Amino acid sequence: MTSPLQQKLKVTGPVVVTANRLGDGAVVYRSADGSWTKDLAAAAVVTTTPAAIELLTAALDDKLKAVDAYVAPVELMPQRVLPGNLRERIRFNGPTIAWPGDH
Amino acid sequence: MYIYDDFDRTLVDERVREFRDQVNRRLSGELTEEEFKPLRLMNGVYLQLHAYMLRIAIPYGTLSSDQMRTLAHVARRYDRNYGHFTTRQNIQFNWIKLEELPDAMADLAQAGLHGMQTSGNCVRNVTTDQWAGVAPGEIEDPRIWAELLRQHLTLHPEFSFLPRKFKIALTASAHDRAAVKIHDIGLHMHRNGAGETGFEVMVGGGLGRTPFLGKTIKPFLPKRDLLSYVEAIIRTYNQYGRRDNIYKARIKILVHELGAEKFAREVEEEWQSIKDGALALDPAVVADIAARFRYPDYEALKDDPPELAKARADNRFRVWLDNSVANHKLPGYAIVTLSLKPEGGPPGDATARQMDSIADLAERYSFGEIRVGHEQNLALPHVAQRDLPALWRALDEIGVATPNVNLISDIIACPGLDYCSLANARSIPVAQEIARRFKDLDLARNLGRLHINISGCINACGHHHIGHIGILGIEKNGEEYYQVTIGGRADENAELGKILGPAVPYGEIADVVEDIAAAYLELRERPGELFIDTVARVGVDPFKERVYATR
């Protein structure tokens, strides 16, 4: 999965804007009210290139709360929003492997 | 162990204070991300998929018990109770918070540890043989020369903004355990015809999207000239290396495009102008550095003490002994490799509790010294043979005595898409599945020495090009695929692996490795013929036919 930061923006389905929180690096999503949330369900979902550019531009203007904002695909399910590819699933759910447990 | 002085401590402490100020200014908004990013990278701080990652250098792979305890403390206090040992004698913490990084760095600094020059376009951690100073037949301890290079190249003002990152490795044994031929500069200590000790100098090695093995530009460099010649190489690279294209900016591209002979002439010209200046090494300076490496107060012991002979009756101990224990330069002692590749564990990971236990065991059995190898395992370099049974029981208890060192399940793997923002595909689950398939130690031992290297992208942090079996994760239409190479090796006979055929999907990659292993068992001339030798003898095609016959 080529880094989303390297992709030209071409929206063909539902997308959100995601980034890492400045203070701790946690995965966050841009919400409609201009805040950042860890809850993907609370993210603003847009479906057109102009809307995505608008959402991303506002996110990138926020220099203090989040870092490296980009547009990421999502899947819209009944009453749920899911990450749209493996990279985003891993960002959302964490590593696909068990962390080393303490003995 | 090398004993740091006040200069080293002051330098590290000042860097922590400087970084704390930079972090505060970033968090307050005084610094933008564009301004802050190069500053954090200079201290080994990356932003990965889920969090910040801190990379800490372990110069020439040597750690004290106190330093290992500090790493355990950082894992416990600031991270999620574990750390990841890398292929370049570093450790990475994957869940560090930017807000807490200055405190973590301050704690590390107390033990002489730091992340300086573990990232960015500068000279990275100088690596060497994890058995340095204890390997039988070694010419001399290469860490002395690594330390000289480290001191000279740390915060070197001329080399802080090179075209790209720059990696140096050196070894002083005939058998290369430091993979020097895949480094920007590889140094191999040897004796010339007159019996003098010096370095064969290789340049332009490296993996990534354009892999090359280093080319020898100086068959014998006297020791006094090490700093001046390295300076001349990096200066030549700094002047001519490309800065217009990140993919062509490493020294390997410059050496390839100029040709090794022309590059060598450029270096020679530069070197002649500086070789007899301030960088010519005064033997007194070298002696001073050497004197700061403290060696254990070894006892006069004999090989094969009764405790060891008695313990051999235990089959599990004997298997571990044969696999994980190597000869020491002194009789009665041994070098013990601690496998960080338990079945089901991410390669190279160690928990805080394991780190603490290893620190204690090193203190008790290895004069408080631990080594880190590029294979992502640890070693205790000074273990009395009489202590091996007790040490084995303790290592077994904490899960680092899996007797799979250099076997098919001793897999080198990068963090891959589970952690890394650059990755295209996962590495760790692939390693885990392969290890599961070969958990039968009899099968693994029958296969013999067989190195698998896995990288989750073309940047090749898992060194897939030089794996006996190399696995590269790629992305096809949103799915993970894996390209396989065979025949690579990282030792003194280094080779780049050859591509076996089309990439296979995630669900098939472990099957492919099983097919390759089965083909090897059929193709080898005799049980003692190593996989890598069979590939060299028969080529790729018989393996290709086996793997792709049904795909």
Image (cartoon, coloured by chain):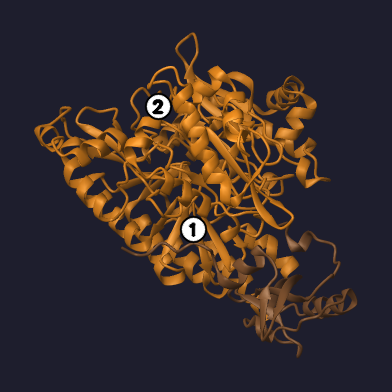
Amino acid of disc 2:
Glu
In which image quadrant can residue B295 be found? Answer: top left
Subunit of mark 2? B
Q: What residue is disc 1 on? A: B10
| Residue at the (47%, 43%) spot, across then down | B411
Marker disc for residue B140 = 2
**Label pair 2/1, CB-CB below 8 angstroms:** no
- On screen, residue B485 versus residue B528, left or right, reads right
Looking at the picture, tell me which residue is in the foreground, B17 or A13.
A13
Circle 1 residues within 10 Å: few <14, some 14–19, many ≥20: few
- Which chain is depicted orange? B
The residues tagged by marks 2 and 1 sit, at their Cα atoms, a distance apart of 30 Å
| Residue at the (80%, 45%) spot, across then down | B243
Helix, strand or loop at mark 1:
helix
Subunit of mark 1? B
- On screen, residue B141 versus residue A96, left or right, reads left
- On screen, residue A53 versus residue B333, left or right, reads right
Amino acid of disc 1:
Thr
Q: Colour of chain A?
A: brown
Looking at the picture, tell me which residue is in the foreground, B100 or A7.
A7
| Residue at the (36%, 36%) spot, across then down | B443
> Residue A21: horizontal and vertical position, in percent?
64, 76
Q: Is residue B243 visible?
A: yes
Helix, strand or loop at mark 2:
loop
Residue extending farthest bottom: A33
Q: Earlier in the sequence, mark 2 or mark 1?
A: 1
Residue extending farthest front: B550
Quarter occupied by the C terminus of chain B: top right
Circle 2 residues within 10 Å: few <14, some 14–19, many ≥20: some
